[in-house]
Image (cartoon, rainbow, N blue to C red):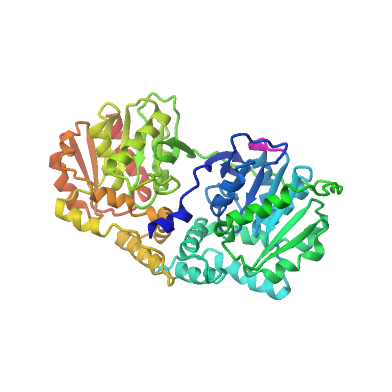
Amino acid sequence: MIGDAALYWRKPDNVKRAYVDGRYGQMHYRIAVPPQADTSEHPPIVFFHQSPSSGRPFEGLVSEMGRDRIAIAVDTPGFGDSDAPPEPPTIADYAAAMTSFLNALNLDEVDVLGDHTGAKVAVELSLQQPDRVRRMVFNACPVYSPEKMAEMMKHLEAERPKDVVPEDGSHILHRWGGMKGWYKPDAPLELYNRDFCESLRGLDLAWYGHNAAFAVKHSDNLPHVNQPILILCPDDGLWDATLAAGPYLKNGRILELPQFGMGAISQHSMELAKILRDFLDTPADDDLPREAARLEPPAPAIEDKSVRRQFVDTRGGQVHLRIAGSRDSTKTPVLFLHMSPVSGRNFVPQLERIGSDRLAFAVDIPGFGESEAPPKLPTIADLADIMTDVIKDVAGNGPIDLMGDHTGAVIALDLAARYPKLIRKVALNTVPYFDTKAREERLAHSAYTPPAEDAAHLASRWESMVRLYGPYMDMRAVETNFVEALRGGPFGHWGHHAVFSYDMDPVLPKVTQPVLVLRPKDGLEEKTLEAVPLIKDVNVIDLLDYGYGFMETQADEVAGYLRNFYDS
């Protein structure tokens, strides 16, 4: 079952991920570059996604188009992994952000594919940068009737953030049912599940995209576009509205694709790549005069963030990390390793504090967050070895200090035991220590839960997250970590599988570095005490008034403990 699921969750080998600085901060993108990219024959093609989503659904198309030209899918600001605007943007703002993106990559003339909201961004970009956009393809280009517009506005209202996050997660389950109605019955459930998980990532800012899109009419802008346009008209709920765009095209045509529906960009990427090549590579009359360029809106002042993101190439694929502080600091760098199944995002408050006077970085453990899953089910030792690649890239030959949380604590202990010259000190939030029987019992339940039509897999995950936070529950934190926990998809159980396959008994006595253990009331407080006698040089700080999430909610206090330990 996981083999079929991985089809939609694994990134193609020829697609890489990276960041550049743009109008609102860092902009994340996926890119495929052929070995001999001749942009004089084939200009780069850039993909703009629908709302609320990211460039991830384009990965297959980026991979295929990237075999004979540069192909790029960028996350719109506020979606995926691109920094958000400071206030609700307009389509003109989004287009200006894409100009800053093209500038950062030194891209001059490009072809563009825009999907839904992405089509409106592409149109506006062609009006702001008429000599930069050569040809455009739109996947759906709706011109709404008043009745349809009223229906779409209801969707927008449903996306707006609520004052209170429901404890039962009903808002998530309701959204699952509503969004699924846009997909054809034969769309693979795992494809829909991935797209749905991607749609949640914007959280309270997810409505920005549709808010901007519904304020702009294709009927007003299309008559001013002189570039050749191909509009794909799939059966995605906007069939009639997309056909209604025909009379407004000056230099374009509509291709009806009733066999395709929502999700076709991922499901039928090879067929769509052929359609794109036929349109983009066939000689056409591109000589219609362009109108004068529209002025782009002024850029807002953006405060530099102390925590930045990047990717590192490792033996296990690209690893995503967040990093703060200076590489020139004389203090020992600190690596943060998160619990399963979330990501390094939880450590941002600590990076901001610890990174004030030293280099501090938090990885997404492979298979979680934005890091690639290893080719096969990893062991703790496998994950630790991948971390040595990250350490070498970021901090050289060390030594470094560690902070490990739950699963991250086990990886940290393995690193300390096997790489004593690389690791100087080790701080842990809980030690998930289990005897053989307990590990076998938990290992038996460490399996992939495939998506269910009725969203039972989401309900189960939500209930688990609420249960973990218990009486210390902050519903905004629950929601954020719920979304992060979905990022692993079919690989989301790999962290716990690695932990419960790992025997700590022969490892703990080999840890000779100083160890600090934070012991909150998180269900493992007694297991932590069982592990402590096996560690040679250990100090325990009881924090039994705190539960899950305390490293964020009590960030100053925790940073104080860590700084005292690392600097002593």
**For the image shown, how many numbered marks are present on the structure?**
0
Rendering coords of residue 477 (x, y %)? 40, 56
Residue 426 location, quadrant: top left
Judge whether residue 107 is colored magenta.
yes
Q: Indicate whether 25 appears above or below 210.
A: above
Relative to 40, 362 lies left or right: left
Relative to 414, 551 lies left or right: right
Relative to 241, 419 lies left or right: left
* Residue 55 visible in image: no
Q: Indicate whether 138 appears above or below 147.
A: above
Q: Residue at x 52, y 56 (%)?
A: 202
Give 200 or 523, whichever is nearer the viewer.
200
Rendering coords of residue 315 (x, y %)? 39, 36
Give 294 or 368, whichever is nearer the viewer.
368
Q: Quadrant of the N terminus?
A: bottom left
Give 437 or 413, whichever is nearer the viewer.
437
In the rendered image, the residue lying farthest to the left is 533
Residue 334 location, quadrant: top left
Give 383 or 86, whichever is nearer the viewer.
383
Q: Residue at x 20, y 52 (%)?
A: 525
* Residue 323 visible in image: yes
Q: Indicate whether 209 appears above or below 298.
A: below
Most prominent secondary structure in the magenta stretch?
Answer: loop
In the rendered image, the residue lying farthest to the bottom is 147
Judge whether residue 288 is colored magenta.
no
Magenta segment: 103-108
Residue 224 location, quadrant: bottom right
Rendering coords of residue 98 (x, y %)? 66, 46
Rendering coords of residue 68 (x, y %)? 63, 41
Q: Quadrant of the C terminus?
A: top left
